[in-house]
Amino acid sequence: EGEGRIKRITLNTMRRLLLPLLALLSCAGQSHASLRKERDQAEARAYHELRKNGQDEVGHTPEAAALRHYNLRKKKRKGLLIKREKSLAEVLFPGVTPELYKTNEEVFMMTDLVQSKKTHVPFEYYDLPVCDAPALADFRRRHRTQRKNLGARLQGVELKPAPFVLQVKKNQSCKKLCTVEIGPRKTRWMRKLVERQYRVHVTFDSLPVLMRSSQLNYAVRGYPVGFKAPPSYTGLDHDEFFLYNHLKFTINYQEDASGEGIYITGFDVHPVTLKHDDSTCPVGMTE
């Protein structure tokens, strides 16, 4: 009886000590939850206010980056596990570290697959009627080894240099690369690619090329092979197919703090189709 009484007294004492502590923890948890709720509501109000004022989410401004991070956190909270906060670059390009480029250094774009969401049959970039590739032996001797992303390694895709050569911090006006004649059979095949919405993918410093529009608030990977214009656009009695024969590239970069070079931060493209008869660029094509 004595031992049982001691045990009951000990348990009662523990309850008296633990109950206030549990109450404090419960209050602290409720306080933390209310603070988090207020923070989420404030972030939501700020997000909707910026979007109401016309702020896009695809630009390179701090406000656009804040909107992207807000949407990223919302998507993560909907999952079963709440992971550690990551930057957008860490989520989109895991394991890729930035590379330092020096002024006037020659940098190649790299080709990727030509793909469509409507069909699962990809093609190589040089299956298209495009300019010839640079000499691989010369490219490998003069340039550093190009890094592959995880998807390219798993699929066994061989990344080849694209026919576009850029120099760091040097603007390039309109430049004609080559003239390609397309035969009837190739023309029919290209029409099918346009109808099936195939997109061309290239990379620059392991960054995928994006078609970006701040006005329409969208950014999508790759650029279309061409487009199909309805009779209301051309004035004809049938659909007309156009191929994109000019590409305007925009490279965004950030200066290194030490002043030794730059880091590539963005890679955008604006495809256009233009008709010209001579060997020069059309008038007004300065980008």
Image (cartoon, helix red, strand yellow):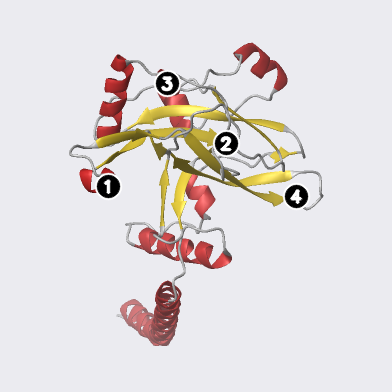
**For the residue carrying disc 2, how many other residues have a C-alpha within 10 Å: few (<14), some (14-19), or many (20+)?**
many
Q: Amino acid at mark 2?
A: Phe
Q: Is residue 43 left or right of residue 194?
A: right
Q: Are marks 4 and 2 in contact (CB under 8 Å)?
A: no
Q: Nearer the viewer, mark 1 or mark 3?
A: 1
Q: Earlier in the sequence, mark 2 or mark 1?
A: 2
| Mark 3 → mark 4, Cα distance in angstroms | 39 Å
Q: Are marks 4 and 1 in contact (CB under 8 Å)?
A: no
Q: Position of residue 118 (x, y in %)?
A: 24, 35
Labelled disc at residue 204: 2
In the foreground, 152 or 187: 187
Q: Which residue in the protein does label 4 denote?
A: 256
Query: What residue is shown at x 39% (from left), y 86% (from top)?
Result: 23
Q: Position of residue 88 (x, y in %)?
A: 50, 54
**For the residue carrying disc 4, how many other residues have a C-alpha within 10 Å: few (<14), some (14-19), or many (20+)?**
few
Labelled disc at residue 129: 3
User: To which quarter of the image does residue 191 belong?
Assistant: top left
Q: Earlier in the sequence, mark 1 or mark 3?
A: 3
The C terminus sits in image quarter: top right
Q: Which residue in the protein does label 1 denote?
A: 233
Q: Amino acid at mark 3?
A: Pro
Q: Earlier in the sequence, mark 3 or mark 4?
A: 3
In the foreground, 134 or 72: 134
